[in-house]
Amino acid sequence: MAKFLTTSGTSHHIEQIIIGAKKTVVFLTPYLFLSRTLLERLQDADRQGIKIIIIYRQNKLRPVEVEVLNNFKSLDIFYSPNLHAKCYFNAKEMIITSMNMYEFSEKNNREMGILINRQEDKELYINAYQEAKSIIAASQRCDSMGQPLATTIPPREVEVKPDFNSGSILEAKAFCIRCHGDIFLNVHRPLCSKCYVEWAKFKNRKHPEKYCHQCGLEKQTSLSKPICKKCFIENKK
């Protein structure tokens, strides 16, 4: 059952969301002013190979955040100019809260939040996850400096639908079609942030890539066709 959180409880569980992540952690927050503790937790997660996805509204970062985030190996940043929601989650738990990622939030503000457990509150978790996914799809990818990239990737002809009835929603593994790095499963964005920056220099959607976005096998793919024939057929079933 969903649990009510006070200010201190919200801060504690946001930290636990990072600590408890196995493969992916997602932050939706209008302002990204991370405390030292959260930066260190995110660094720990990155060292463990955890995929970190951040969607935020303010299109600039402080130097300390740029310095830390620029060294992350598995990070996707998205810019959403209309974002007002605050939501933090991994594959098991989610927090929907009033708390922004201000460094002084816990010190100065009275906040409230709701902690959702995916197993106990499955329908609620899935509905919130779908909305988060919609926000990500409508957002603009940023580089590691937090600056929106000039070009967005247009919609694809194919769509991979996560299976909400089996396994973990966020822990389904996907791959960058160029470098084979672990990324969020999304055929609309089958390149990691670094490879996308390289692709954006030429913007050739048919440029041959090396791997299937879904299964990770060595297959001839491209931005317009990011998954192999076998995965495409399986997704149609």
Image (cartoon, grey):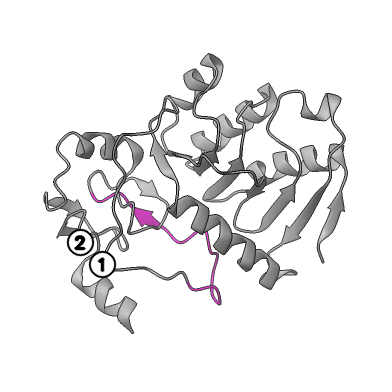
Residue 128 lies, with reference to residue 192, above or below; the image says: below
Lateral position of residue 237 relative to residue 16, left or right: left
Residue 107 horizontal/vertical position (percent): 84, 24
Residue, x 42% and y 24% (percent of image)? 145
Dot 1 amino acid type: Glu
In the rendered image, residue 173 lying in the magenta stretch gets the answer: yes
Residue 94 horizontal/vertical position (percent): 68, 54
Residue with the mark numbered 2: 225
Quadrant of residue 221 within the rendered picture: bottom left
Residue 83 appears anywhere in the view: yes
Residue, x 43% and y 39% (percent of image)? 74
- Helix, strand or loop under label 2: loop
In the rendered image, residue 115 lying in the magenta stretch gets the answer: no
Lateral position of residue 9 relative to residue 224, left or right: right
The quadrant of the image that shows the C terminus is: bottom left
The quadrant of the image that shows the N terminus is: bottom right
Q: Report the magenta residues as a range.
A: 163-177
Dot 2 amino acid type: Lys
Residue, x 47% and y 41% (percent of image)? 49
Q: Earlier in the sequence, mark 2 or mark 1?
A: 1
| Residue most extreme to the bottom | 237
Q: In the image, which disc is placed on residue 157? A: 1
Residue 20 appears anywhere in the view: no
Mark 1 closeness class: few <14, some 14–19, many ≥20 residues within 10 Å: few
Residue 144 horizontal/vertical position (percent): 41, 28
Residue 217 horizontal/vertical position (percent): 23, 60
Label 2 with label 1: CB-CB less than 8 Å: yes
Q: Foreground mark, 2 or 1? A: 1
